[in-house]
Amino acid sequence: MLLRIALSLLLASLAYAADLPFTIAGLSLMPEPWNKEANFAKMERYARQAAAQGAQVVITPEGFLEGYVGNEKHSPGLTRERYLAVGEAIDGPLMKRAAGLARELKIYLAVGFAERRRDEMFNSVAIFSPDGVVASLYSKSHTADDEPFNTKGTGFPVVSTPFGRWGTLICYDRQMPETARVLAVKGAQLILVPAWGGYGEMNDMMMRVRAYENGVWLAFVHPRRCLIIDPQGRIAAANSGEHDQIVTARIDPSAARKGPLQRRRPELYGEILNQAK
């Protein structure tokens, strides 16, 4: 199964991106810890509402399916055994239902979940296409050393869609400017950032800078904060208050700016590859 998914991801990364404008929806929702069935039902209800409002791309926060229980600060008494038990394989029953929902609604559906691969756990985001197949699978590569049972991801995939090229980061990944830059250099026009941790004025500024410095659209989706930011660093849409809600915006992938990347001089940047002392 994993080999088949890897092949589909490779084909997706090579597919032609048509750069069609589209409507994106961030589901700024608070899940229930450990209750995957209840969280899936909530996601489904809001995804249907978003699709009815014209959304073609729908995104949940980080770890939404199980309620982001893999963080030991968020889940006191967390054990490896309990965490493994709540994990969901990419071809598990709820992921299959998510794929079916994307197919039924004809949307791209990005779901944050605790992914189980045999005896390893990952903090992942899967994007299902309108055909119900895995278009992208990304695993969080940076943490604040507070996810003791998660294996860190090691790559930054970019997927081609009819709505442009997309990359994904998860929460703490956004703190490192290199992560968004790698995605932009690889051609991403939109960066999805499902998150759970800190939010507020500093985070808003950081997300606007990430969009501006890379000339990309950016969607930050948190249970209590959602931002859709354009390539000029301007907020195109945001949540109102901290209650459960859908945040939508119209995105034109062709508006991504190439200037910040075209004027780089990578031959001068070798020093940042050295290990920090």
Image (cartoon, rainbow, N blue to C red):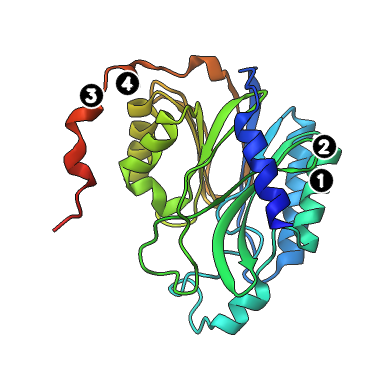
Q: Position of residue 49 (x, y in %)?
A: 77, 39
Q: Residue at x 53, y 15 (%)?
A: 254
Distance in Å between CA atoms under marks 4 and 2: 36 Å
Q: Residue at x 43, y 57 (%)?
A: 197
Residue occupied by mark 3? 265
Q: Earlier in the sequence, mark 2 or mark 3?
A: 2
Tag 4: amino acid: Pro
Distance in Å between CA atoms under marks 3 and 1: 44 Å
Element carrying mark 2? helix
Q: Earlier in the sequence, mark 3 or mark 4?
A: 4
- Foreground mark, 2 or 3, reads 3
Distance in Å between CA atoms under marks 2 and 1: 6 Å
Tag 3: amino acid: Arg
Tag 2: amino acid: Leu
Residue occupied by mark 2? 105
Q: What numbered label is drawn on residue 260?
A: 4
Q: What numbered label is drawn on residue 101?
A: 1
Q: How many marks?
A: 4
Q: Position of residue 258 (x, y in %)?
A: 39, 17
Q: Residue furthest left?
A: 277
Q: Position of residue 80 (x, y in %)?
A: 55, 81
Q: Earlier in the sequence, mark 4 or mark 1?
A: 1
Count neighbours of disc 3 (C-alpha within 10 A) and say few if under 14, some if 14 to 19, many if 20 or more: few
Distance in Å between CA atoms under marks 2 and 3: 44 Å
Tag 1: amino acid: Leu
Report the side of 162 relative to 123 (left or right).
right
Q: Position of residue 259 (x, y in %)?
A: 34, 15
Q: Earlier in the sequence, mark 4 or mark 2?
A: 2
Element carrying mark 4? helix
